[in-house]
Structure formats: structure tokens, C-alpha cells
Amino acid sequence: MDKNNIGYAVLGLGVGMGHVRGAMDLRGGRLVAVCDLCEDRLAKAVDACKDSKSKDVRTYTNFTKMLNDPDVDVVSIATPSGMHAYHAIMAMNAGKHVLIEKPIDVSVARAEEIVRVWKMMGVKASCVFQCRRWPCITEVKRVLDEGKLGEVFSGLYRINWLRTDEYYAQPIASGEAWRGTWQWDGGGSLMNQGVHTTDLMQWLMGGVESVTSATKIFNHKIETEDFTSSIVRFKSGAIGNLVSTTCNGGKTTTDLQFFGTKGSVCIENTKITSWVVPGEDEAEMIAKYADGGAAVTKDAAAAQGHAFHVQDLIDAIREDRKPYIQPDEALNALKVVLAVYKSAREGREVRIDEIK
């Protein structure tokens, strides 16, 4: 492998198109191949690359053949969630580094197998949780780590989204819908959208001890759920609330609020709406992040979601360091989601260490 020209590939061109756009003009690498069963998606990926350094990208409909391409060093796994482990393990066993879309998988056993193979093969592996890179979130992380809010006793996390029936009807190769199914999506609003927030909860406030939850289907013809509500108990002693939905007919937002004995902060999407932090100017912070922080970040990739993770993995390979997020962290987020579902099914508080 030429560490100055690492070959990148993407499997799955639904959400994987974000990985394609992030890999087209890599520093120290290039997009060499894409794989999907749909010829139209392959054509769109090729067209997207035509004016980039990856204009000669090759197309595959067979994943094994793409893995045998000697120019492929890294693979983004962007297939339906219930297929992540199967494809990631195939790639790692072939000696490829991997970037896995969220969630890492929908099964703890399969996710743990990803972790085992990753460690055994000695490859680099990372997972997509780009919300950690929102500039306003890095500010929240700073004040929490510095203890500026005092003892943080509560955190509120709300994912108020809308997903249409057409979104849930998108098929896999067999023609059946995969979103909102237990087998392929692993859940509904919380597994697909809210898993980002379960990752943020633990990154910002520490590990989760238990959840007490309810779920319901309000507005979609799906197997799983389009609404969840949970009381979250953290290992620190803090108590929080986690709510997710994909049937919100109002404003689509992700709202995060943190309350401590010395201050509090509130985030709506990528903007700061309240900043009561000792020694810091609230009006200045709100104005600074009024555009989501684009004006204050010098790292263009940080504001581009998938592009950050793609470039970070390339840099981790070149520099022989850990990627920003590794599979064991992604496994923690999965366990919280599955604990919510178990609690709702059984009507009781569920500890995270029960999830196997």
C-alpha cells in the first residue's frame, strides 16, 4: 500500500454517496472503486466523480470482486444496518481497513465479532458519528470536561424528526423495504436517527447505567417504532431524558440541554440557544455559532459530516494512530439503543450490562 496514495472504496450507494463525496478529493488517497447492486446508483456515483481526482473510479456489482481489486486499501461499509457486520468482517478478513456507517450493526453479538476481527487482523477501523464534530458540540464537551457547569445532574436529548412513508418504503435488492424492520434496520427512530444522540450522551456525560423506556408507532406502517421516550440513569448519578421520533409534523430539530449546579447550556441542531457558563459571554457564544460554527472552524472537513471520518481514517493509516472513533465506542451506543427496546418490551428498568 502506498501511504501517499491510499485507495478508497465505498460499498452501498444510498447513504454511501456521502462517503463518495467525502472521498473524491482525499489528501493522501483517492476513491478507486464503488460497489452497489443498482446500476443507476453506480452511474450517479461515477457522474459525481467526473470533475474530481477520482474521475477514473471503477464500478462493481460484486463485493468479493471489489475486495480482490489490488488498488482497494480501505472500504466504507454503507449497506443496510443489519448487513454491516457481514460486510465489515469480509473486508477486514481481506486485509482492508474499514469505515462503518452507524449503527455498527443491529446485533451485539455481531458487533462484538467486528471488534474481535478488527483486533485480530490489526487493521484500522472506525465508525460514523459525525455529530461529535459539530463545532457547538465541541464547545459543550469543553465546558463539561473543564467542570464549568459544576455537577451535571441532568441532560435532555430530543430528536424531533420527520420521515415520510416513501423513506421507509425504500427497498433492498430483494425488493423488500428494509427501514423500520427489526432484521435490517434493527429499530426505528432511535436506531436509525437517534443512535447519533446515544453516542453523544455517553461521549459528553459518561456511561449509561440503565434506561426505563416506552416506544410506540404513531404514524408509519413499520415493524419497529417511530417514537421512543426514556429516562436515562448515568453512571455519574445524573438522570436524563432521551426522546426520538420520525413522525414530528413541526420543525425538525435535534435539541440537547445540559444542566449543572453552576450553569446550563442548550443546543438546537448546530446552534447555541442558551449559554449560562461562569466567565463566558452568552451573547457572544450565541452569535459565534449562529451559522452552526462554519465561520469559526478552520477544518473544512469538520463541517462536512462523512468527509471528516473518511479523511480521518486515511490520516490514521498514514500516521499509524487510532481513528477518531473506534468500533468498541460504537458498540456502547448500540447497547443503549437495544436496552431502550428491551425496557419497552418488558415494561421495566433495564441495565446496560444486561445487553449481551
Image (cartoon, rainbow, N blue to C red):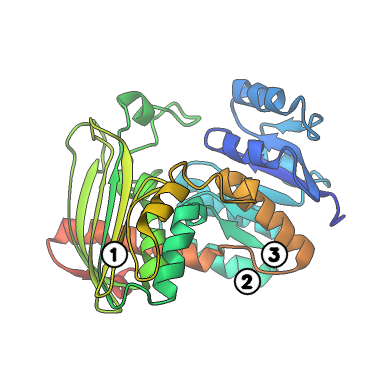
Labels 2, 1: front one:
1
**Which residue position is annotated with label 3?**
123
Residue marked by disc 2: 119
Q: What x and y, as percent, mark residue 14?
A: 53, 33
Relative to 109, say whether 219 is above or below.
Answer: above
Residue indicated by mark 1: 264
Quadrant occupied by the C terminus: bottom left
**In the displayed structure image, the side of residue 10 where residue 128 appears, left or right:** left
Residue 203: x and y in percent read 43, 66
Q: Are marks 3 and 1 in contact (CB under 8 Å)?
A: no
- Residue type at the position of mark 1: Ser
Viewer-closest of 39 and 133: 133
Residue 316, horizontal then vertical, whole percent: 71, 62
> What is the C-alpha distance between the residues marked 3 and 1?
41 Å
Work out which residue is located at the far left of the displayed protein and give it: 347
Quadrant assignment for the N terminus: bottom right
Circle 1 packing at 10 Å, graded few (<14), some (14-19), many (20+), is many
Q: Secondary structure at mark 2?
A: helix
Please tell me whether mark 1 sits on a helix, a strand or a loop: strand
- Does the rendering let one see residue 24? yes
Q: Quadrant of residue 11?
A: top right
328 vs 224, left or right, is right
